[in-house]
Image: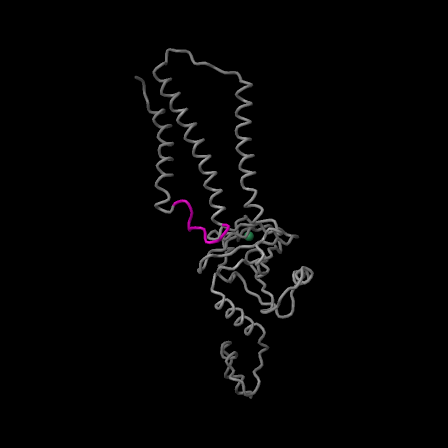
């Protein structure tokens, strides 16, 4: 009976892995939040599939390693067998992972299609905004409220640059809950990545391209929007919020934005001056009247 420290050490870890896998769901260790978007459930399922594959591989190889060590400790007199390469084994361990990867790539195709292929976007998807990433913020441009795009030519024109009546915010994206919304993602400088963990949405913003992405939040709330592509010294602070609101709240929000951003700084005689008051200059303007 030799020293069994190493075999026990190597068998200990797969046991920890199995216990962790079993208790993790009860403690919410898998994901920071449940998936709060329709596609999020399917994306999580892909993660779980990969988790099962790597867990089986990890546990299997470590148990095999532990077993070999355990046997070896008791047979120290016996000469070890040295292999100088086995063609059959090499073929086997090349084909097996290749098969697993091929399986994953085929298995995920449908989720990929739903998320990425524009002709597969849900028919009721509505254009919400253009989101432009730049070092180190998210610039959001909404079309003028009530503006309906009738064809892709109009959308192209809108994407070509600022249009009369557009609304702007920075690091603050509002979406109506339970609706499928479309954003056009672009970058002003380097590569960034638009990531809303709670909605399981992640898409690179690539300079020179405009990338359409759709998503739909299934719950009201506000969620982190982070950049997940190391984009420069200020990458760590490139974050915003995504607010999922009811449709009424969302409409109200856009109306308020519109009133603020189309205000020309002049109150007409007889108006309440409420807008001026919100900018904190009501007294001086009233004096001028
Ligand atoms: Cu960035």
Image quadrant in which the C terminus is located: bottom right
Question: Is residue 273 placed above or below 183 in the rendered structure?
Answer: below
Question: Is residue 114 placed above or below 267 in the rendered structure?
Answer: above
In the depicted view, which residue is nearer to us: 66 or 77? 66
Question: Is residue 20 placed above or below 166 in the rendered structure?
Answer: above
Tell me the quarter of the picture where residue 259 sits: bottom right
In the depicted view, which residue is nearer to us: 269 or 108? 108
Residue 103 as seen in the image, left or right of residue 160: left
Tell me the quarter of the picture where residue 71 sits: top left
Judged from this view, the residue extending furthest toward the left is: 1
- What residue is shown at x 52% (from left), y 86% (from top)? 286
Where residue 127 sits in the image (x, y, percent)?
Answer: 59, 61
- What residue is shown at x 45% (from left), y 59% (from top)? 222
Where residue 14 sits in the image (x, y, percent)?
Answer: 38, 31
Image quadrant in which the N terminus is located: top left
Where residue 219 sits in the image (x, y, percent)?
Answer: 44, 58
The verdict on residue 35 being magenta is yes
Judged from this view, the residue extending furthest toward the front is: 123
Where residue 213 sits in the image (x, y, percent)?
Answer: 58, 53
**Magenta span:** 29-39
The verdict on residue 232 being magenta is no
Residue 217 visible (yes or no): yes
Residue 172 visible (yes or no): no
Residue 252 as seen in the image, left or right of residue 123: left
């Amino acid at each position: 009976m030799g020293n069994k420290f190493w075999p026990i050490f190597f068998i200990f870890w797969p046991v920890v892995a199995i216990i962790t896998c079993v208790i993790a769901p009860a403690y919410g260790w898998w994901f920071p939040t449940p998936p709060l978007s329709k596609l999020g459930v399917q994306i999580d399922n892909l993660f779980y599939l990969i988790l099962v594959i790597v867990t089986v591989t990890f546990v299997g190889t470590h148990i095999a390693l532990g077993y070999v060590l355990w046997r070896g400790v008791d047979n120290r007199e016996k000469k070890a067998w040295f292999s100088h390469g086995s063609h059959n084994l090499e073929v086997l361990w090349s084909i097996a992972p290749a098969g697993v990867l091929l399986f994953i790539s085929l298995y995920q195709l449908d989720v990929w299609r739903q998320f990425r292929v524009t002709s597969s976007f849900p028919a009721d998807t509505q254009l919400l905004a253009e989101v432009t990433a730049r070092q180190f913020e998210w610039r959001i441009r909404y079309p003028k409220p009530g503006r309906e795009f009738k064809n892709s030519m109009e959308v192209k024109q809108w994407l070509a640059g600022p249009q009369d009546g557009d609304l702007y915010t920075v690091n603050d994206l509002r979406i109506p809950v339970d609706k499928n919304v479309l954003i056009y993602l672009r970058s002003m400088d380097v590569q960034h990545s638009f990531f809303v963990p709670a909605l399981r949405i992640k898409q690179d913003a690539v300079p020179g391209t405009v990338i359409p992405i759709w998503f739909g939040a299934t719950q009201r709330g506000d969620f982190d929007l982070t950049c997940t592509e190391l984009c420069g010294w200020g990458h760590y602070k490139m974050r915003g919020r995504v607010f999922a609101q009811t449709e009424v709240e969302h409409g109200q929000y856009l109306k308020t934005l519109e009133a603020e951003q189309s205000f020309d700084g002049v109150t007409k005689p007889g108006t309440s001056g409420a807008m001026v008051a919100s900018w904190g200059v009501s007294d001086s303007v009233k004096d001028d009247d």
